[in-house]
Amino acid sequence: MLPELTLSDVERDQLERWVRRRKSAQDLALRSRIVLECATGSSNSEVSRRLLVSLPTVRKWRTRFLEQRLDGLVDDDGAH
C-alpha cells in the first residue's frame, strides 16, 4: 500500500503556481503535476497513465516529495 500523500494549503498553492507559470522549467511543472495527482489518492500506475510518464518517474517524485516536500522537487537538476 502506498503511503498517503497529503498536501498543506501552502504546498498545494505552490505546486499549482509552478504548473501554471510560463517561466517554470517544464521538468518542475511536470513534477508538480505528478505530486498533485498523487495527492488525489491515485495510485502510481493511475498517475503514470494519466500524465503519460513512466512508472519509475512517478515513484521517484512521490517518494522525493514525501521525504523532502517542496524542496525535493526543485533541487534535482537546478530547476528553480
Image (cartoon, rainbow, N blue to C red):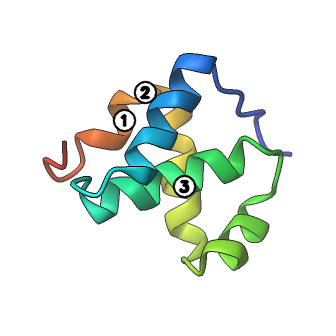
Residue 50: x and y in percent read: 71, 74
Q: Label 3: which residue?
A: 33
Q: Label 1: which residue?
A: 72
Residue 11: x and y in percent read: 52, 25
Residue ID at (57%, 61%): 58
Above or below, 15 against 76 in this view is: above
Residue ID at (58%, 30%): 12
Residue 48: x and y in percent read: 66, 72
In terms of image quadrants, where is residue 9? top right
Please state which of residues 56 and 31 is positioned toward the viewer in this rendering: 31
Residue ID at (72%, 41%): 39
What kind of residue is marked 2?
A: Gln
Q: Label 2: which residue?
A: 68
What kind of residue is marked 1?
A: Gly
What kind of residue is marked 3?
A: Arg
User: Mark 3 or mark 1: which is in front?
Assistant: 3
Question: Is 60 on the left or on the right of 44, as rendered?
Answer: left
Residue 35: x and y in percent read: 58, 46
| Tag 3 and tag 2, C-beta contact below 8 Å | no
Res 45 label: none
Q: Secondary structure at mark 3?
A: helix
| Tag 3 and tag 1, C-beta contact below 8 Å | no
In space, the residues marked 3 and 1 are separated at their CA atoms by 14 Å
Q: Secondary structure at mark 1?
A: helix
Q: Residues within 10 Å of mark 1 (few under 14, many from 20)?
A: some
